[in-house]
Image: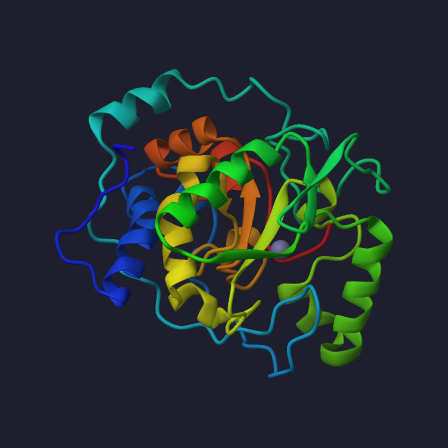
């Protein structure tokens, strides 16, 4: 799609910057929104730990990536002006645009999607499945070997995940990279965690530098999947960066977010977020 720029010479490192700049650069071009959160605030790195199922290791926070380049195109600016931000609910759990974070739990807390289907071994909401299938097909066409390592999780399963994390890291450490039950996007069935077929960087910050992570950063938005927890937006999302975690919102919304220069759902919809639980 036209909003994605392809550099004339792409190194692995360069591709990462381009992929990040696609969102970050567009955000930097915006005005009036960025001041609402203290972006780039220092975040204390959690202690190292071994990888455990369905949760992320702590991430040392490095310098923010360059915000040069990737200005929104005139076409995408038009999209931003005409986009109907009230077309779907941001509070109903079944809505494709639901905002789930530490300030906004899933309601009801034991919500489950009406229909889940299995895609590449993981359960996802039926609403998100076609775009996930399309993304995976596109990646295969490009010779990228993506796998899924997590999809829909029940409240009870998330509770187990978070409890294990607290036992290892304490509450404060766990809350940086694991949602409390009832606060996980995975419970909506609209979020997945990707990995590479060789599994060498599963749920690791290193995934962002793998061919698979780089491909996702560049192409997931074309299929409606949003990189949800970025390096530069930790103060807004309340989580350490997770280059493997993507949230389905639909390609129209991703395009509108890029056009508006707002890389997070919280900023685009004016919904509160951040590191503190309500
Ligand atoms: Zn995830």
- Residue 79 drawn above or below residue 181: above
- Residue 24 drawn above or below residue 106: below
The quadrant where ligand 1 appears is bottom right
Expressed as whole percent of the image width and height from the top left, the position of residue 205 reads 49, 70
Residue at 17 percent of width and 51 percent of height: 7
Left or right of residue 278: residue 246: left
Left or right of residue 278: residue 209: left
Left or right of residue 124: residue 11: left
In the rendered image, is residue 254 in sight? yes
- Residue 265 drawn above or below residue 178: above
Residue at 54 percent of width and 75 percent of height: 44
State which quadrant residue 179 falls in. Answer: bottom right
Q: Quadrant of the N terminus?
A: top left
Residue at 29 percent of width and 20 percent of height: 78
Residue at 28 percent of width and 35 percent of height: 3
Expressed as whole percent of the image width and height from the top left, the position of residue 124 reads 68, 41
In the rendered image, is residue 42 in sight? no
């Amino acid at each position: 799609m036209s909003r994605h720029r392809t550099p004339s010479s792409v190194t692995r490192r360069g591709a990462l910057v381009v992929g990040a700049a696609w969102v970050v650069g567009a955000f930097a071009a915006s005005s009036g929104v960025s001041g609402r959160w203290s972006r780039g605030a220092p975040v204390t790195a959690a202690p190292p730990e071994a990888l455990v199922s369905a949760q992320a290791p702590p991430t040392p926070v490095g310098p923010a990536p360059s915000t040069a380049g990737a200005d929104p195109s005139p076409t995408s600016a038009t999209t931003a002006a005409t986009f109907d931000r009230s077309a779907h609910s941001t509070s109903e759990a079944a809505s494709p645009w639901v905002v789930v974070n530490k300030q906004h739990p899933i309601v009801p807390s034991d919500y489950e999607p009406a229909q889940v289907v299995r895609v590449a071994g993981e359960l996802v909401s039926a609403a998100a499945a076609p775009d996930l299938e399309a993304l995976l097909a596109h990646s295969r066409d490009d010779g990228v070997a993506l796998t899924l390592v997590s999809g829909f999780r029940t409240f009870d399963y998330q509770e187990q995940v978070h409890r294990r994390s607290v036992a290892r890291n304490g509450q404060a450490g766990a809350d940086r990279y694991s949602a409390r039950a009832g606060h996980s996007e995975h419970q909506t069935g609209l979020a997945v965690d990707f990995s590479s077929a060789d599994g060498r960087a599963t749920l690791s910050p290193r995934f962002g530098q793998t061919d698979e992570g780089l491909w996702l950063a560049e192409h997931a938005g074309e299929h409606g999947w949003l990189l949800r927890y970025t390096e530069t937006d930790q103060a807004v999302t309340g989580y350490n960066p997770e280059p493997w975690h993507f949230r389905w919102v639909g390609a129209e919304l991703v395009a509108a977010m890029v056009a508006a220069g707002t890389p997070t759902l919280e900023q685009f919809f004016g919904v509160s977020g951040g590191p503190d639980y309500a």
